[in-house]
Amino acid sequence: MKVLEAKFVQDFIKMTDDAFRMNWHERNGGNLSYRLKEEEVELIRPRLNPPTEWVSIGTEVPGLSGEFFLVTGSGMYFRNIIVDPEVCLAIIELDEKGENYRIRWGLVEGGRPTSELPTHLMNHEVKKRLTNGKHRVIYHAHTTNTIALTFVLPLEDRVFTRELWEMATECPVVFPDGVGVVGWMVPGGREIAIETAKLMEKYDVVIWAHHGMFCSGETFDLTFGLLHTVEKSAEILVKVLAISPKKLQTITEDNLREVAGSFHVTLPERFLYKK
C-alpha cells in the first residue's frame, strides 16, 4: 500500500487540517506525532525509503526502541499538510537504544522532524508505559484562550483544573484527572521535555504558560476532542472574566461529585476544594 493511502496517514492529515481551521496553528505553530502499530508498519514497509544515517534525538527514550512515528516537520505549516503531505510530514524510525532516529519517508524537500521531537517522544514513552501501549497520539497546539488564561491565573494545576471543570458540565468527565501546568520555559529542548513528562505521569493534558497545550490520547479523535474540550472551557472562562470578575453562580463541589458519580469517574479530592 502507498503510504498516503494508509488510513492512519489519512486520519493524521485530517486532524491537522481540522486543527488549522480551529485557528490554533498560525504560521508553523504546533506539532503532532503518532506511534505506529506493528501492522501499520508492515503495511507500508515496502514503500519506505532505504535506511539512512542515524540522527541524535537529543534525549533517550529506551521504552520506544525500534518504534516508528509519523510526525510533522520542523518549520512546516499545518495549513500546507493537506496540500503536500510528503513535503510536510515524516515517518521516522528509532534505533534499538532509543537515542537516535532516521527518516524513512517524507520531508522530500529536506528538513527534519518537529523541533519538539524530544518532548513528543518523552511523553510517548511515559504514556506507552502508563496505558499499556494504548496511547499513541501526542498533540501540541497554540490554543488562544488557554494561553490567555496563563497570564491571569496562578500557574497551578489545582487552580486551572478547578476553573476549567466549572465552565462546562462535561469537563470533569472528559478530563477527570485534571490538567498540569508548566511555567514558562524555552520550547524545543530537553529541559521542558523533562518537566512535561513529569506531569504526563498524572495528566493527559499539560498547559505550557504563554505558549499552548500538550495532550495525549489513544486515537486522533480522542486526542483532538480532549484538547478541544479544554480550549472550549478556557474560552468560556475568558468570556466570564471579561463580563465580571465575580461569578454569581457556578458548578459547586457537590455538583462535581454528582457528575462524577453519574458518569462513573473519580475526581481527585485536592481539586474539589477552593482556598
Image (tube, rainbow, N blue to C red):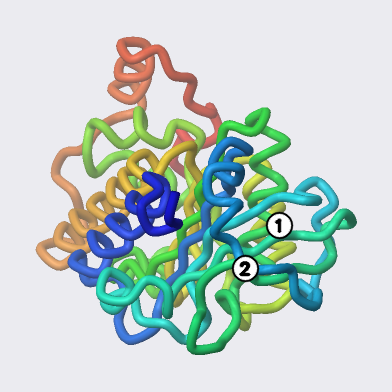
Q: Residue furthest left?
A: 243
Give the percent coordinates (x, y) of residue 115.
Answer: 59, 79
Left or right: where does residue 110 sit relative to residue 31? right
Left or right: where does residue 119 sit relative to residue 214? right
- Tell me the element at label 2: loop
- Give the residue displayed 49% in from the left and 88% down from the top: 109
Give the percent coordinates (x, y) of residue 179.
Answer: 49, 47
Name the disc covering residue 49, or none.
2
- Give the residue displayed 70% in from the left and 78% down from the top: 189
Give the percent coordinates (x, y) of residue 5.
Answer: 36, 52
Relative depth, front residue between 231 and 96: 96
- Give the residue displayed 65% in from the left and 53% down from the top: 68
Around disc 1, counting alpha carbons within 10 Å, would you say few (fewer than 14), some (14 to 19), or many (20 or more)?
many
Relative depth, front residue between 99 and 89: 89
- Examine the rendered structure and indicate whether residue 101 appears above or below residue 181: below
Relative depth, front residue between 76 and 123: 76
The reply to whether discs 2 and 1 touch (Cβ–Cβ < 8 Å) is no
- Examine the rendered structure and indicate whether residue 115 appears above or below residue 229: below
What residue is pinned by disc 1? 122
Amino acid type of the residue that numbered disc 2 sits on in the rendered structure: Asn
- Examine the rendered structure and indicate whether residue 259 appears above or below residue 124: above
